[in-house]
Image: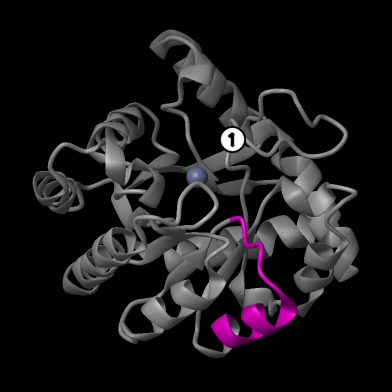
Amino acid sequence: MTLFDSHAHYTDGAFGSEEERDALITRLSEQGVKYILNAGTNPVSSLQGLALADRHPGLFASVGIHPGDLEELSDPETAFRQIKELAKREKAVAIGEIGLDYHYRTDNKEKQAYWFSRQLELAGELGLPVIIHDREAHGDCLKTVFSFPEVKGVFHSFSGSRETAAELLRKGWYLSFSGVITFKNAPRLAEVVPTVPDDRLLIETDCPYLTPHPFRGKRNDSGYLFYTAEKAAELRGCDAETLARLTLANAARLFSKTGIVV
Ligand SMILES: [Zn+2]
């Protein structure tokens, strides 16, 4: 089985030293997680993700400013210019993660909206797909992405309703599911999984976060993606092998700059 983890954060401190990270990614690749997309959240983590990608043939990076990182930037305009330059690098295959997060704060909605739109515009300019972070902001996220009809991408760790999913799918978007679909307290999300067409489904870990059941609380890594693949397969009434094959093909199609041929 060959898996593509469409969303991971291997630049996170939870993964230890550079040597430890490199050893882990090499081991995961040998175990079948051949492809990983490392998501950037600001210029520093985006650059670190690209450095990691340069050392691992199966690892690719997205570059972008996460809504939760905005307030830590001394100058968002400079950060945006840095992202724009990084996006031109060979292994930068998407803009992200970008979006809106109303879970942590709602007092800077306008600022979040402004930089979300600027980065969607950038993706359109560069012809790159986007990776959307949407936390408790479904309505505003959909309105914003639909105002850039030339831009397409994936809603990562999708957490919306069936209706939200249907609307995104109608407009050509992909949905990525994380270990949350294995959680006992997320039955409504599990119901969305079988409604996604075969050619729009992705899976991810969002590691080091969101470790699948029954490992919740442990540090997540792409090795746990097998549990999410199995759960998604069970919900869709297919086998894990089939699910792995179609999600890999979808990731290769969406992130075409990877050059992966399946
Ligand atoms: Zn993430």
Where residue 103 appears, as percent x and y from the top left, is 55, 52
Q: Amino acid at mark 1?
A: Cys
Q: Is residue 143 above or below residue 190?
A: below
Tell me if residue 52 comes above or below residue 2 in the rendering. Answer: above
Farthest residue toward the front? 107
Position above or below: 203 against 194: above
Per the image, is 162 magenta? yes
Task: Measuring from the top left, give residue 139's x and y in whole percent.
Answer: 52, 77
Residue sitting at 28 percent across and 29 percent down?
51
Instruction: State the image coordinates of residue 172 (x, y, percent, origin top left).
Output: 50, 84
User: In percent of the image, x 38 and y 78: which residue is there?
Assistant: 144
Toward the viewer: 245 or 77? 77
Kindly identify which residue carries mark 1: 207
| Res 261 visible | no
- Vertical order, 63 against 153 (above or below): above
Which residues make up the magenta segment? 157-168
Q: How is the image coloured?
A: one colour
Horizontal side of residue 153 vs 92, given as left or right: right
Residue found at the far bottom of this picture: 170
Which image quadrant for residue 30?
Answer: top right
Describe the element under mark 1 as helix, strand or loop: loop
